[in-house]
């Protein structure tokens, strides 16, 4: 019997916490499998993907800069990955066919459902800060969850306007990002602002209702200034680590045949990595 292998493909990839995350589950469920980091240059991506099934790989996660490129290389692409325009989860079939999916949208909503179960997606508009790949996944997640109105703002206005047109949401000038706060039910930061070593996110949440949910995809630090400010005025605040943990669940289940759970012990293990 072959020992199933999986891994994370990126360039660079040494910073990834996915090997600790999946390794914890493999150990917990006593599965004879391995999950490894795979540093793959762009020029080698095609050859690596063709070789992996013959080496015993059943699948892989994909991170920067390959998340868009793998769409064109896959034999089958999920509707979600097509909408987002990127894939983060690959599965190799018994015949070597490559299936590409994106579980970031699932991970985002699963994180909110676990850590802010009282939040109602239909209760009001959402504001997304940023217009990168994460924002694309989160817009899809919010639309599928039932958010009726989504505002999008970005420091580069053209990116926000292009993304807003693609997904049918409303672009706001970055200078006006606080204007919609009184009506929001959800505020999401997908930018690097507030991350360790980056500039702070300059946004006063005073006008945000206490019933609103605030979440930040940044998890270094775990408690960003944005989340601290939200908690101080009574809002629900959800950190970004849970999105990373939850997006890994579908892939692990497909590759290793067991559906894992996101627990406090798992969070602790990944944070300690």
Image: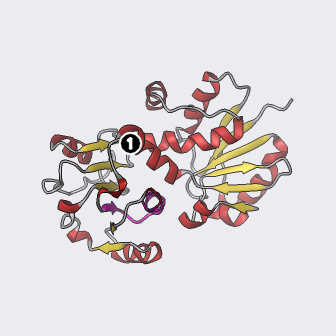
The stretch in magenta equals 126-143
Magenta portion: prevailing SS class: helix
Image position, residue 188 (x, y; %): 33, 55
Mark 1 neighbour class, 10 Å CA radius: few under 14, some 14 to 19, many 20 or more: some
Vertical relation: 123 (above or below) 249: below
Taking the magenta stretch, the answer to whether it contains residue 129 is yes
Residue occupying the point 63% across, 43% down: 251
Vertical relation: 79 (above or below) 109: below
Question: Could you tell me which secondary element the residue under label 1 belongs to?
Answer: loop
Residue occupying the point 78% across, 56% down: 47
Image position, residue 67 (x, y; %): 59, 58
Image position, residue 102 (x, y; %): 58, 55
Image position, residue 54 (x, y; %): 85, 45
The residue labelled by disc 1 is 219
Q: Is any part of residue 74 visible from this angle?
A: no
100 sits to left or right of 125: right
* Quadrant, the N terminus: top right
Vertical relation: 200 (above or below) 77: above
Taking the magenta stretch, the answer to whether it contains residue 105 is no
In this orientation, which residue lies closer to the viewer: 17 or 26? 26
In this orientation, which residue lies closer to the viewer: 119 or 43? 119
Q: Is any part of residue 167 visible from this angle?
A: yes
Q: Quadrant of residue 112?
A: top left
Vertical relation: 227 (above or below) 179: above
In this orientation, which residue lies closer to the viewer: 179 or 65? 179
């Amino acid at each position: 019997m072959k020992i199933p292998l999986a891994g994370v493909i990126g360039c660079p990839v040494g910073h990834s916490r996915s090997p600790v995350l999946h390794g914890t589950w493999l150990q917990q469920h006593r599965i004879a499998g391995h999950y490894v980091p795979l540093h793959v240059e762009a020029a080698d991506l095609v050859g690596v993907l063709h070789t992996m099934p013959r080496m015993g790989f059943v699948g892989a996660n994909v991170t920067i800069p390959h998340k868009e490129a793998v769409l064109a290389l896959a034999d089958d692409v999920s509707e979600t990955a097509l909408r987002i325009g990127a894939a983060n989860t690959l599965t190799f079939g018994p015949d070597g066919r490559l299936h590409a999916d994106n579980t970031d949208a699932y991970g985002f909503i699963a994180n909110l459902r676990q850590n802010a179960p009282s939040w109602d997606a239909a209760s009001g508009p959402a504001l997304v800060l940023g217009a990168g790949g994460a924002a694309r996944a989160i817009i899809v997640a919010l639309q599928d969850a039932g958010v009726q109105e989504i505002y999008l703002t970005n420091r580069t206005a053209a990116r926000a306007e292009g993304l807003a047109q693609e997904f049918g949401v409303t672009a706001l000038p970055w200078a006006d990002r606080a204007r919609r706060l009184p009506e929001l039910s959800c505020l999401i930061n997908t930018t690097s602002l507030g991350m360790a070593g980056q500039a702070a996110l300059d946004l006063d949440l005073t006008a945000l209702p206490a019933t609103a949910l605030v979440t930040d995809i940044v998890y270094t630090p775990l408690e960003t200034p944005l989340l601290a400010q939200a908690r101080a005025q009574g809002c629900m605040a959800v950190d970004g680590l849970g999105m990373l943990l939850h997006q890994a669940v579908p892939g692990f289940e497909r590759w290793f045949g067991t559906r894992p759970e996101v627990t406090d012990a798992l969070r602790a293990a990944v944070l300690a990595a």
